[in-house]
Amino acid sequence: MNQNINVMKIFDFCKSNVPHGNKLGKEIFNELRSYVDKYRDQTFFEISFQDIEFADSSFARESIVLLAQVYRGKKGFILRDLYDEDVIDNIDYAAVALDQPLALRFEDGIRLLGPTLTKSNLEIYELLKIKKKLTTSQLASLMDLSVQNASSKLKKLVDDGYILRFEETAETGGIEFIYQIIG
C-alpha cells in the first residue's frame, strides 16, 4: 500500500484564484485525471486550495468531486488549505449533489463533506480515524459485531467512497483486507 501523497494545487491547474463554472471545471477535471493517471501506483492525493480565494459549486462538482467519484474505492483525495466557509459550503453542496464524500484536512483533524453517514457507519469511521487501519476481524471484536456484519459495513463504506481497502499478506500467509479512511 503506497502511502506517499502527491499534492495537486488547484491554482497550478487553472491559473486563477477564483475558479468557477462548469466549463472550467470540466477542463480542470481532465487535467487532474491525467495527472492522477500518471501516478498509477499512488493511492492518496491531496488537493490544495492554497492561493484560491473563491470556487463555486459548479466548478467543484465538475472537477474535484467528479474526480473523487471516478476513482471511488481505488484512490483517496484529501482537500487541504481550505478555510473559507463559503467555499467549503460550495464544495459540500457539490459533493452532496454527486453523492460523493470528500475529506477536508485541518490541522486538528478531518471534516467530511458530502452525504451524511448513518450513526453506526459514523462510529466505524471515527474508530478508523483513531486506529488508522483495521481488519474486518479487528472491527468485529472492537464493536462486538459478527465478522460477516463487520465485513458488510466496511464494504459499504468502501463502495460509498468513505474509506479504502487494501490487500496485505496476513501473518498466517493468506490475504487479509486492511481498511483505512481517506484523510
Image (cartoon, rainbow, N blue to C red):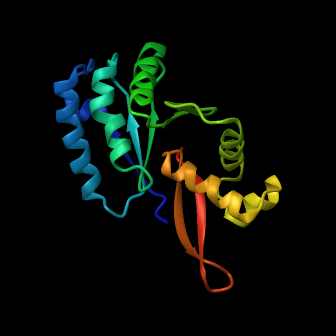
**Count of numbered badges drawn on the protein:** 0
Residue depicted at 33% across the width and 35% down the height = 64
**Furthest residue in direction top, as rendered:** 86
Q: Is residue 9 among what the camera can see?
A: no
Does residue 143 appear to the left or right of 149 in the view shown?
right
Q: Is 1 located above or below residue 113 in the figure?
A: below
In this rendering, does residue 73 appear at all? Answer: yes
- Residue at screen point 45% across, 57% down: 4
**Which residue is at the front of the view, 121 or 138?**
121
Q: Where is residue 69 in the image (x, y as percent from the top left)?
A: 37, 43
Q: Give how far across and how far down residue 40 sits, in percent.
A: 31, 61
The C terminus is located in which quarter?
top right
Find residue 123 and report its horizontal and vertical position in percent: 72, 42
Is residue 72 left or right of 58 when viewed as pictured? right
Vertical placement of residue 134 versus 104, above or below: below
Q: In this view, does 120 lie above or below 146?
A: above
Residue 27, percent from left and from top: 17, 34
Measuring 21% from the left and 50% from the top, which residue is drawn there? Answer: 34
